[in-house]
Amino acid sequence: MSDYSIWICEYAYVSNYHKSGIVYGAHNQGYQKLPYCYALIKGNNHIAMVDVGYNHKAYGETLADRFGVENWHSPRDVLAKCGVRPEDVDTVFVTHCHFDHFGNVDDFPNATFYVQEREVAKWVWVMSLPERMRWMMTAMDPDDIVKAVNLAKDGRLVTVDGAMEDVLPNIDLHPAFDTHTFGSMYVNVRNDAQPASDDSWVLAGDLIYSYENIEGDGSAVSLDKIYVPVGLATGSQTNLVLVTEEMMKRVAYDKRRIIPVHEERLKDEFPSHIGEDGLRVTEICLADGESSRVSA
């Protein structure tokens, strides 16, 4: 029995991203593709997303150009591959407020957004610091925090303080404070509806970019089969290692059940389809009775 379908939907990508940004300490090891994706969850009479991407205009476009983002497509075009419209989405879980995860709020007019209270509050604090300290604003669009305030004004923002179980049936939120960002969190889908699930999936946000963060790459800086944190952290790499262990416990140490949305090799682990637009849909699991969106 599976209650939810999960798809990872690519909406843009960076063709040549510094590997040292993906794997801590991987200096002078070249570049690799970094897909920009969000997760779509469908089941139990809900359509939810984990993050919403960014809108390729205004300062979002400026940041995208700075990072070398290519081939951006709107949620309307991307979600259509899974038979969903942005208006159909009722719930959004925001893993963190970097522009490529939280910038496209406006395209989801009927969704309630869940984000850690600490994530919003600490970005306001950073924005108040002197200009010389603005390194911490890497990948941040200040207007996105204003969007969060407007969501609150409209009654569509829920600020979470720590863990929150059964936000939707059998979907839990778990904090990862002072890791990739101040108030990052991950999403745990217990797809068999059991408290101690044997069908558990973790949607990791940017707590993990790549499978190499889970098992190393065999290089001199990362012995094989050890956790190597992501390269970008406003918190600490120690906290990233600790939360990786926490996530792995939730999936009984089955690496395949932790889903890093920036991982190009998802297509090698799960059924996937690359459309004429050059963007990939990866099918993580299907709810009972749900039709595949990637099969011919």
Image: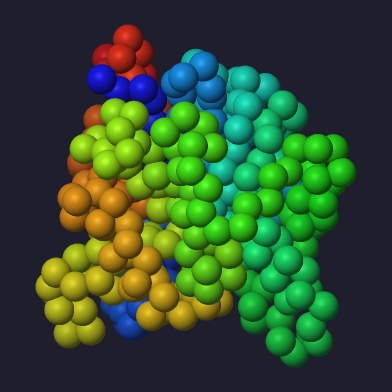
Report the residue that reaches farthest toward the top: 289
Quarter of the figure with residue 29: bottom left
At x 19% / y 65%, what residue is drawn?
Answer: 215
Which quadrant would residue 23 be assigned to in this image? bottom left
Residue 215 seen in the figure: yes
Residue 58 visible to an observer of this rendering: no
Q: Residue 262, position in %: x, y?
A: 40, 53
Which residue occupies the extreme front position in the image?
A: 195
The quadrant holding residue 127 is: bottom right
The foreground one among 195 and 108 is: 195
| In this rendering, position of residue 232 left or right of residue 148 | left
**Residue sitting farthest toward the bottom:** 132
Relative to residue 147, is residue 89 drawn left or right? left
State the image coordinates of residue 216 (x, y, percent, origin top left): 20, 70
Classify 235 as above or below 153: below
Residue 14 % position (x, y): 47, 56
The colouring scheme, among rainbow, by chain, secondary structure or one colour, is rainbow
State the residue at coordinates (39%, 71%). 240
Relative to 231, is 111 above or below?
above
Which of the two residues, 108 or 10, is positioned nearer the viewer here?
108
In the rendered view, tell whether residue 31 sits above or below residue 165: below
Tell me which residue sits at (31%, 79%) in the image.
26
- Viewport quadrant of the C terminus: top left
Q: Quadrant of the N terminus?
A: top left
